[in-house]
Image (cartoon, rainbow, N blue to C red):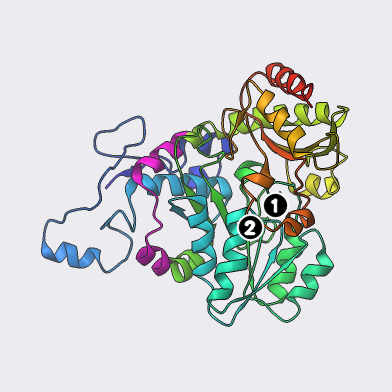
Amino acid sequence: MPKPILPPELAAELSPATLLVRGGSERSAYEETSEALFMTSGFVYGSAAEAEAAFKQDGSRYVYSRYRNPTVTMFEERLRLIEGAEACRATASGMAAVFAALLCKLRAGQRVVASRALFGSCHYIVAELLPRWGIETVQVDGRDLAAWETALAPGAALSFCESPSNPAMEIIDIAEVARLTHRAGGILVVDNVFATPLLQKPLALGADVVVYSATKHIDGQGRALGGAILASEKFVKDDLGLFYRHTGPSLSPFNAWLLLKGLETLELRVERQCRTAEAIARLLESHPKVTRVLYPGLPSHPQYELAQRQMSAGGTVVAFDIGGDKPGDKEACFRFLDALKLVDISNNLGDSKSLITHPATTTHSRLKPEEREALGIGDALVRLSAGLEGEADLIADIERALQQV
């Protein structure tokens, strides 16, 4: 079996920067420097008795990579240490993490309360799939604590939100929603993708489960899909365990290895991207061609004070409205997007390359117009994910493109 590099007692004393490089690493008998990539679907046993013992599921033996794999375990352990969670399970994508975290816990006849400001695929699960299976769902304005309290008053098995939200950067009071959810007898699941494990700690604020699309900042280089669920050992064992084992949302060893490498530079990338995003947001806030800027790190953000309490920085993403010839001028937005030379049009985010998208026609295009309007996702809104290019180069590119509006 591989041997851990860091004893648990030492890991507890180390800074996030050190854990991102060395946390969770194990070495095989070959004493390799870089974590080993175990590209295997199965494992062999010295005897039939060994195989029998392995399937007693005590966790001491790898039996099949759909269940557990050494490379995946290293990724899970490193992310667990950074998040401050008791346990972590990696998944094939962020949406696999969301789906598994919700469905492993829910049963027909139960209630779910969710923020209405959700990524398009998350909205589909909450609004379309859960009701098909006899689960009542209620969506509320996540910024309104009174709305949460009213919706949770009859009781709920689970609450779900993302903060900051995609793409309009709504901030949810995680601590208060956790308190209301627990009072209602449920658990709180938080999608922490925009904040990353470095800028916000939902578990420390009272959440029960945190989910990530590791495809975003954790990989950060547009290479691999992945996701993760972090929670208590009890949740991962009793609720998620058999669901994960038998439905197959597991992460591939190769993607886990790439994500391990991504974690090593996560702090450096996120710190740089946050600085660039804030600089872009400040530029846009004073630009005559921009009518609204949504960035949690700016005092102009409607929930700036809450963001300051919950997050250590404003994040890597900026959303803003382009001012055209008429309100909600999609054509003006498209002229701006098409005029960009450095920033790529893409629906991904958290990448080392700066990316921009028009949510109303991409990530949230399946929502009804009135649903998009309620979320502040008009035809004038664009979402920009700051990358690692030179800040001055990006600002010049954006300013040039705005001249086309």
- The rendered magenta stretch, by its main secondary structure, is classed as helix
Q: Is residue 300 left or right of residue 383?
A: right
Closest to the observer: 218 or 206? 218
Q: Up-down: is 297 above or below 163? A: above
Mark 1 and mark 2 residues within 8 Å of each other at the beta carbon = yes
Q: Amino acid at mark 1?
A: Ser
- Outermost residue, left side: 47
Quarter occupied by the C terminus = top right
Closest to the observer: 277 or 135? 135
Residue 334 occupies quadrant:
top right
Q: Up-down: is 284 above or below 341? A: below
Q: Is residue 322 left or right of residue 101?
A: right
Q: Is residue 313 left or right of residue 24?
A: right
Residue designated by label 1: 163
Q: Which residues are magenta?
A: 241-261
Percent of width and height locating residue 90: 45, 52
Residue designated by label 2: 190
Query: Is residue 260 on the magenta stretch?
Result: yes
Q: Which mark is first along the chain, 2 or 1?
A: 1
Q: Amino acid at mark 2?
A: Val
The answer to whether any part of residue 314 appears in the image is no
Q: Which residue corresponds to the image point at 21% horizontal and 66% vertical from the top-left?
A: 53
